[in-house]
Amino acid sequence: MTDTASANVAEETKKETPFLLKEQKGTTLHITLNRPKTLNALSLDMLNAFQEALDPITDDHTIKALIIKGSGKGFCAGHDLKEMQSHRGDDDKGKAYFDELFATCTKMMLTLAKLPIPVIAEIHGVAAAAGCQLVASCDLAIAEDSTIFAVNGIDAGLFCSTPQVALSRNIPRKAALEMLMLGERIDAERALTLGLLNRVVTKETLAETAEDFAVKAAMRSRTVIALGKQAFYKQVELSLEQAYKVMGETIVDNLMMPDAACGMEAFIEKKKPNWPSENQ
């Protein structure tokens, strides 16, 4: 087979294999990163596919939780360094491609924070660089006990500047800087202690635990979770005084919602609430 024919076969295979696998089970949407041969590296095509999968979720009220996971041996190894390096031969030495890559990545990570549902990371193997950023950008995170976490771009002469945004909002500064400056890997138990994870579980119970989180979310009002999630990410960036002011207004808005009236009555009467917002 000629080099040209081989390249064409590789390109056709790339087109036929989806970058992501999507499956909705009940009220939970599962998105699986599907490039196991690259440890699910976040190429530009992968990021675009990810964004395309996330965009419809806000308006789809049948979805009450999102679980993100990786196929193959690991969750996500970060950006695709081979793809990045290949663009150094461009006329601008890759500048336009790099701008597009990181703008696309930033948009996708911010979308996760803006979704009106809990976003749950189900992690195994490795979560490195932008893969660790993806974990930190999710609302909740459960990891297999053998998982390794790193933001070790420094090993390749590249400081993980964008991953540090999410990481530094999850774990203490000195721990973040140790990982960023020294390329230190941490295990799942250390990640749990630092606050990057909610749970560390066995391989056998990983999917079950993530699904349990999603099921618990589904029992709550999607409308109220949406309000609360938006409020959470807003208040953590404010001063203490500003946070109390804005959240005081938010909780009153929440109290005026039909779901709050229904939920409080159901709680007092010890019965299961039937959320009005989901019966419209």
Image (tube, helix red, strand yellow):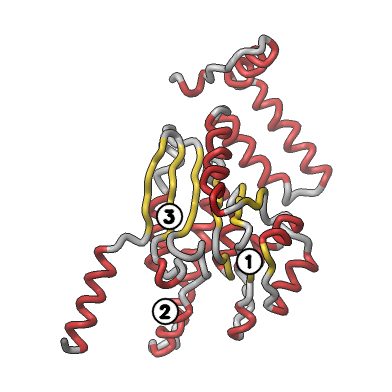
Q: Amino acid at mark 3?
A: Thr
Image coords of residue 152 (percent x, y): 63, 76
Q: Say which residue appears at 64% left-offset and 60% top-offset.
A: 166
Q: Mark 1: few, some, or many residues within 10 Å (few <14, many ≥20)?
A: many
Q: Earlier in the sequence, mark 1 or mark 2?
A: 2
Q: Say which residue appears at 40% left-offset and 44% top-offset.
A: 56
Q: Which mark is residue 83?
A: 2
- Whether 202 is drawn above or below 225: the answer is below
Q: Amino acid at mark 1?
A: Phe
Q: Mark 3: few, some, or many residues within 10 Å (few <14, many ≥20)?
A: many
- Whether 28 is drawn above or below 261: the answer is below
Q: Amino acid at mark 2?
A: Glu
Image coords of residue 76 (percent x, y): 51, 65
Residue that badge 1 annotates:
149
Image coords of residue 231 (percent x, y): 66, 40
Closest to the observer: 157 or 226? 157
Q: Dividing the image into 4 quarters, which one contains the N terminus?
A: bottom left
Q: Secondary structure at mark 3?
A: strand
Q: Dividing the image into 4 quarters, which one contains the C terminus?
A: top left
Q: Which mark is residue 32?
A: 3
Q: Secondary structure at mark 2?
A: helix
